[in-house]
Amino acid sequence: MFMEKEAKKIKPIVTSRLLFISALDKIYLVILGLNLLVLTIANFSGRISSPYYNFWARVGREIIILIVLSILYLFLNWFYKCAVKTVLCLTENQVYKEKYIPFKRTETSIPLNRITKVSTHTAFWIFRVIIIHQYNHLPMFFFTWNHQEFKDELNKLLTTEKKVENIYATKNIINKKGWKVVMWVGVGLAAIIALIGVIRLFNVIFTKPIDITGSYSYYGDTVEIKSDNTCDIDDIIYDDVTKCTWRFNEETGSLVIDYEYEDYSYYYGTHIEEDTLYLQYDYDKDAIVYGYNTYTR
């Protein structure tokens, strides 16, 4: 039994890769890293010592953030691997292009006798393109850094039937050494989250829950927050309040007051209107803030 011989390959004389390919993985990692940093800071921001700081809900959101960023990494890595494997080569008898896009791979081979002209252009020094003109076909555009080298070598080519070798077929955004960095970043992130959890735990254990019900006053004006979820805000609402209920938004630390009051208009006469008032609760002073006024117990 004879083994089938492997197809012969030849390294191209010049290989041109996509512009910015050497920095694309760094750009993607910076994007992912900044997203992780900003979203994590936004997620865990707030007063950790507050009794209304919902730590476990934030941990749940952080897990969702990590899952979303992991999916985003897989998509970016997919496009990156396609970009890495896309090359334009010069061999002894042809201009060869190997192009990858998601779900599709194409090979283009242009014999030298079909090429009429090769031109190069540079814009703002870094945006470089090589243009290959050919008989009865549209020009081929390829954005690459070494466009001038490609053009200079073109006239030296001969013919060959050997297959072009693409040496950039198995590279990922994160290489083996990079995964060690990712591991340590993950360990550091887990340690920070665990530290926030420990701080939160101690605050929950040793901090007495705050009861916001009671009477708050500011220069004679009074706000009454009652335990039956009703309230008295006559001193700060000058309309005739007929009904007042309150609820507390633990996430924002604000007191939301829904109230009804009597209003008079020319068309409807005396009628009932509804409105909502937002008061900020100051944990440190145990006070309610309304505009520039601070109502204390």
Image (cartoon, grey):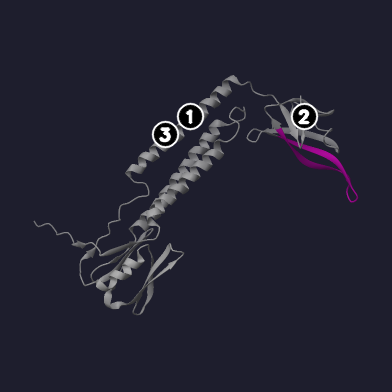
Look at the image and say whether residue 272 sits in the magenta stretch. yes
Pick the front one: 165 or 222 = 165
Look at the image and say whether residue 35 sits in the magenta stretch. no
Q: Residue 242 location, x and y as percent?
A: 84, 35
* CA separation in Å, label 3 and label 2: 45 Å
Q: Is residue 92 left or right of residue 103?
A: left
- Mark number displayed over residue 187: 3
Q: Secondary structure at mark 3?
A: helix
Pick the front one: 10 or 74 = 10
- Mark number displayed over residue 194: 1
Which residue sits at x=44%, y=34%?
A: 188
Q: Is residue 263 left or right of residue 290?
A: right
Do the residues bearing badges 3 and 2 touch, measured as CB atoms within 8 Å? no
Q: Residue 256 location, x and y as percent?
A: 72, 36
Q: Earlier in the sequence, mark 3 or mark 2?
A: 3
The residue labelled by disc 2 is 295
* CA separation in Å, label 3 and label 1: 10 Å
Q: Is residue 111 above or below residue 63?
A: below
Pick the front one: 8 or 130 = 130
- Mark number displayed over residue 248: none
Which residue sits at x=50%, y=38%?
A: 62
- The amino acid pointed to by label 3 is Val
Residue, far bottom:
136
Q: Write the start and end of the magenta stretch as one range.
A: 255-280
Instruction: Check the picture and name the quadrant holding the N terminus.
Output: bottom left
Q: Residue 112 location, x and y as percent?
A: 27, 75
Q: Earlier in the sequence, mark 2 or mark 1?
A: 1
Q: Is residue 185 left or right of residue 231?
A: left
